[in-house]
Image (cartoon, rainbow, N blue to C red):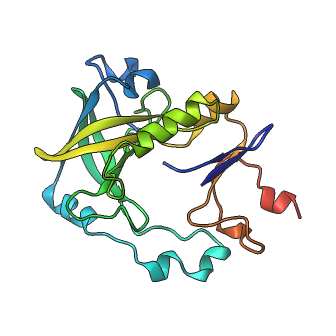
Amino acid sequence: MFFNILNKPATWLCASILVSATAPANELTLDDVFPTDRVLDVQITVAEKDWDKIRHQSRNFVSALHEDRKNAHIDGPYEYVTADVKINGVKFEKVGLRKKGFIGSQSTSRPSLKIKLNHTDKAQKIGGLTNLTMNNNKQDNTIVSQFMGYALFNAAGSPAPRCAFAKVTVNGKNLGVYSHVETVRKTVLNRGFGNEDGTLYEGTVVDFYEGWDGSFERKTGNRDWRTSAK
């Protein structure tokens, strides 16, 4: 769950991206990377030892759901390694690659993935977006729930990420079709609210329970509602 403090509040169910075309990376736009009429081709190259490292990293219920979460966000166990990625032929070198997922989407053979384009080159991005999210749809055999759900929210005028489909390969091995979801950051804020000046929070398996306000993680912005409200 995400919510944003701007001129008006918003709530989101969570979910991130990749690209198209053969134009230079700096000419790619967000519209280019969220097509609805084709599947993106995402090719990842990473050292085998690093791939083995990240795909075997995991969470457990005890640490992930411990009551300590009520006081502060608990950092995840996943670490970035260095990799290269080609998105429909456009190459991004020395990006950050890590596993993602809470509990249900974890997998050692076909993990959900985060790609950090500006891991080493701080200027490397696509239309302002620096972090890409590839969801493995482990809990959705239809593969279409995220794609259709976010399309519905956006069509209804409710701020939400965009979603596309991507064929993902790692070191030449086809991992199948992933849901490529726009990371909820400044690009979503600008599109949904007209600016990026508010403060964005993320809450994982939490709600607005009394005494649990510390469990929300501030992702962007400077205004902290938890301290300003006291």
Furthest-front residue in this view: 142
Using residue 132 as the reference point, say whether residue 41 is left or right of it.
Answer: left
Q: Relative to 166, say whether 200 is above or below.
A: below
Split into 4 quadrants, where in the image is the N terminus? bottom right
| Residue at 65% across, 68% down | 215
| Residue at 42% across, 32% down | 125
Using residue 62 as the reference point, say whether residue 205 is left or right of it.
Answer: right
Furthest-right residue in this view: 230
Front-lying residue, 96 or 205: 205
Q: Relative to 67, say whether 185 is above or below.
A: above
Q: Position of residue 94 (x, y in %)?
A: 28, 43
| Residue at 43% across, 65% down | 102
Front-lying residue, 87 or 93: 87
* Rendered image quadrant of residue 229: bottom right
Q: Is residue 130 visible?
A: no
Q: Is residue 158 visible?
A: yes
